Amino acid sequence: MSRFQGKTVFITGASRGIGKAIGLRLAREGANIVIAAKTAAPHPKLPGTIFSAAEEMEQAGGRALPLVVDVREEEQVQAAVDKTLETFGSLDILVNNASAIQLTGTLQTDMKRYDLMHHINTRGTFLTSKLCIPHLLKSDLAHVLNLSPPLNMETRWFAPHVAYTMAKFGMSMCVLGMAGEFKGKVAFNALWPRTAIATAAVKNALGGEPMMQKSRTPEIMADAAFYIFCRDKSTCTGNFFIDDALLREEGIEDFGQYAYSPGTKDEDMIPDFFI
């Protein structure tokens, strides 16, 4: 029996992209997946809803709980955690995946967008972690995974889009601090991709279809997350993992399976930020 059978995974932003892929990966292991995201009705430019994602996860072998959650709203996050405990009785893994992005310089970033990125990325991650930790402390798995980059404090990662970098590094600082605060009790790690990942953000807001063709699929991040959760909470904490480096540690060498466009060589992939 899989160690994830009957375990409960709370994933923010899990209606599509990387969050959904992680949910599907763990659903195949028999896990309960809480899909905490905003998209309840079909969006004209974004695929999927919390309900369609839940249907796919149940077809994959797990149980799913779709919940409308805006991580900026404390009452909504608390209600979602309460519903999770009411439905499944436990909370074992948290994935802080919800994020907002705008790659603009200081003068081009309006404060409304600045606030959105910081409220979702940094504050949302802190808030969701804070409300989940009391229940994670009761779990034998007890993992928190933030989809955030290594803390590379170099000018080149800040200068082009300082507001976005600050917001993402806030998520990473949660890993750094909470890993120490809860060492031995709850594991806190970060995961970031080596290359661009073929998501709606890439297609609609970043590089469009040409960038998608030189990206890897979200499944590489899902497989990497799976192996992190397989590690012991007491010894695997405070790490800033890169997806393919982690998978190599697990003996995986064929990254062609993750190419969005089959046959694209690893060296032709577009590298992601912060690496």
Image (tube, rainbow, N blue to C red):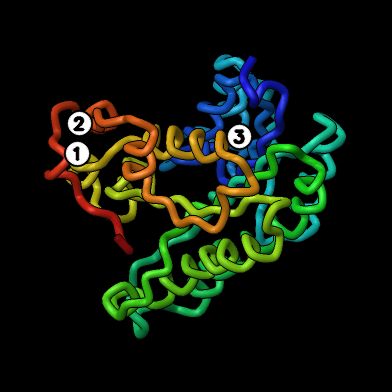
Front residue of 44 and 233 = 233
Q: Residue at x 51, y 64 (%)?
A: 172
Disc 2 from disc 1: Cα separation: 5 Å
Q: Is residue 155 above or below residue 46?
A: below
Q: Residue at x 64, y 37 (%)?
A: 35
Q: Earlier in the sequence, mark 2 or mark 3?
A: 3
- Does residue 148 appear left or right of residue 201 in this picture? right
Q: Which residue is mark 1?
A: 213
- Does residue 96 appear left or right of residue 250 in this picture? right
Query: Residue 125: x percent and y percent?
Result: 62, 59
Q: Which mark is residue 261?
A: 2
Disc 2 from disc 3: Cα separation: 27 Å
The extreme bottom residue here reads 107
Looking at the image, can residue 103 be seen?
yes
The extreme front residue here reads 235
Q: Which residue is mark 3?
A: 50
Mark 2–mark 1 contact, CB under 8 Å?
A: yes
Query: Please, what is the three-letter code of the amino acid marked with disc 2?
Result: Ser
Q: Residues within 10 Å of mark 2 (few under 14, many from 20)?
A: some
